[in-house]
Image (cartoon, rainbow, N blue to C red):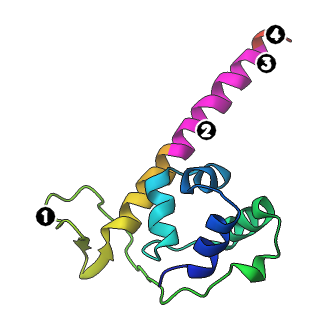
Amino acid sequence: MQKEKLRTIRKKKGYTQQQIADVIATDVSNYSRKESGDVKIIRDEWEKIASFLEIPMEEIYEEEDGQVIINNDHPVFNDSSSSGYFHHYNNTTIPLTIVEELQDYIKLLKEEVQRLKEENKYLKENK
């Protein structure tokens, strides 16, 4: 379900999707999927967006259509059998946008871990 309230207020205030994407630390294509309803906007993101737009969260918040429940102890995300829109494993179908979002998030976490390791090393060397 498209986030019409969010889109309308964002445009009314003159902000681009890129500016909102920066607020929630994602790329513009991922934010676009969030605004169009293909990818879920989590509560923390709703709060950051509302704060940036200087409005109460209730003015932009819209419920999500559904939820994805995955019960799989060993997911495989790089399965060559996945189609262009869905990823299949363990008798579960997951929209590819969710898999891509998780991969993007993992990449961000790995970069953050590396940055923290370097910062920690620097602090130890300069004690």
Foreground mark, 1 or 4? 1
Q: What stretch of residues is rendered in magenta?
A: 108-124
**C-alpha span from label 1 to label 3:** 46 Å
* Residue that badge 3 annotates: 123
Earlier residue among tags 1 and 2: 1
Left of 89 or right of it: where is 122? right
State the residue at coordinates (58%, 72%).
7
Residue 71 position (above or below residue 112)? below
Q: Tell me if mark 2 has few (under 14), some (14-19) or many (20+) residues whose alpha carbon lies within 10 angstroms of its own.
A: few
Q: Quadrant of residue 10?
A: bottom right
**C-alpha span from label 3 to label 2:** 16 Å
State the residue at coordinates (37%, 66%).
97
Per the image, label 1 sits on a secondary structure element best described as loop
Residue closest to the far right: 127
Left of 119 or right of it: where is 126? right
Residue 24 place in picture, x, y as percent: 64, 55
Mark 3 is on which residue type? Leu
Q: What numbered label is drawn on residue 112? A: 2
* Residue that badge 4 annotates: 126
Q: Quadrant of residue 85?
A: bottom left
Q: Relative to the observer, which residue lies in front, 10 or 41?
A: 10
Q: Tell me if mark 1 has few (under 14), some (14-19) or many (20+) residues whose alpha carbon lies within 10 angstroms of its own.
A: few
Q: What numbered label is drawn on residue 17? A: none
Q: What numbered label is drawn on residue 81? A: 1
Please say if the residues under marks 1 and 4 sit with CB atoms less than 8 Å apart: no
Residue 106 place in picture, x, y as percent: 48, 50
